[in-house]
Amino acid sequence: MKDRNKKNRKIIYRIAIYVILGSVAVFCLTRNVRAKYITEVPFSGNVKIDAGLAQEFHLYEHKAVIDTETSNVSDGVYKLEGETVDRNTYTGIMPNSDIAKDPFITIKNKTDSKAYLYVEVCEKDFPKDKDGKNKITYFLTDEWKKVTYKDENTDEVQNVKGINGGTLYVYVGKDLTKAAIQCDNSLTKDKPDNTIRINILEGNKITVDSTINNSDAVQTFGLDFYGYLAQIPDSMLANTVHTPDVYEVYCASFGELE
């Protein structure tokens, strides 16, 4: 009996050593990838809302963690967990890969007041190739449309920048010709808990180009999302001929843009 217990203890000891060594190896691999390709990639979400438009208004995403179930956890492969956060930091990003990311807006108990929903997307220090193209790419879903204006001097259509300097989009829903958020409380009344969820990124991912290299790891880059729910002024609704301009509504709530 003593010999058997002694043998069992040896087996348990060996297993413990293997687990520890495995953890050390994973840690070293992850650190090497982080140093080689990128340092930190922060993401965050923020919202602004006119008073009296909804009971709740949030911009969240699910927590991103290293997918330890992949064959090689040093690949910088991430998966999304059930916990919601307003910021994710990614490390160990690999070339020619997708980053799991699912920012979304939730609106609870939208009131009868007519409004437009916006999201502003801000890129910070994205690595670029020799032609000036981003090595990190993403697309918004078809339910979002860029807010534009016509330059009076050049007569060219320009993209509108939000109050944080990012590209501004308006939610159009399934109807790509107008802002579908301009409606009454029917937007949320038939939803579970009277809450609607609106996704932002197509495929819930960001794509890393194959050309990411060592020189791109010297500085942090980021992608921030800002959500806005702006009430349409009664003076704009009085005009029954033209739909209220999404650019003017945004400025009326959050100030004139440069």
Image (cartoon, helix red, strand yellow):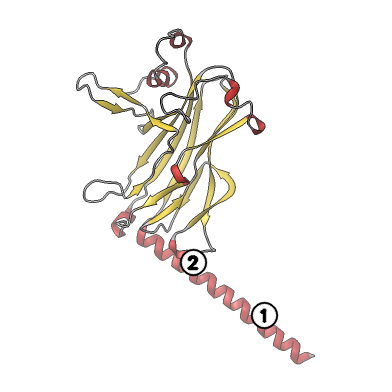
Image quarter where the N terminus lies is bottom right
Q: Nearer the viewer, residue 82 or 141?
A: 141
Name the kind of residue labelled 2 in the image: Phe
- Percent position (x, y) of residue 194? 64, 29
- The mark found on residue 27 in the picture is 2
Element under disc 1: helix
Taking 23 as reference, is 129 above or below it? above
Q: Give the residue at the far right of this rendering.
A: 1
- The mark found on residue 12 in the picture is 1
Name the kind of residue labelled 1 in the image: Ile
Taking 56 as reference, is 233 above or below it? above
- Percent position (x, y) of residue 149? 31, 23
Taking 129 as reference, is 254 above or below it? above
Mark 2, other Cα within 10 Å: few <14 / some 14–19 / many ≥20: few
Q: Residue at the location (59% across, 47% down)?
A: 83
User: Is 188 positioned to the left or the right of 245 in the image?
Assistant: right
Element under disc 2: helix
Mark 1, other Cα within 10 Å: few <14 / some 14–19 / many ≥20: few
Q: Residue at the location (66% across, 83% down)?
A: 11
- Percent position (x, y) of residue 94? 39, 59
Q: Give the residue at the far left of this rendering.
A: 154
Figure quadrant of residue 242: top left
User: Is 8 positioned to the left or the right of 165 in the image?
Assistant: right
Figure quadrant of residue 190: top right
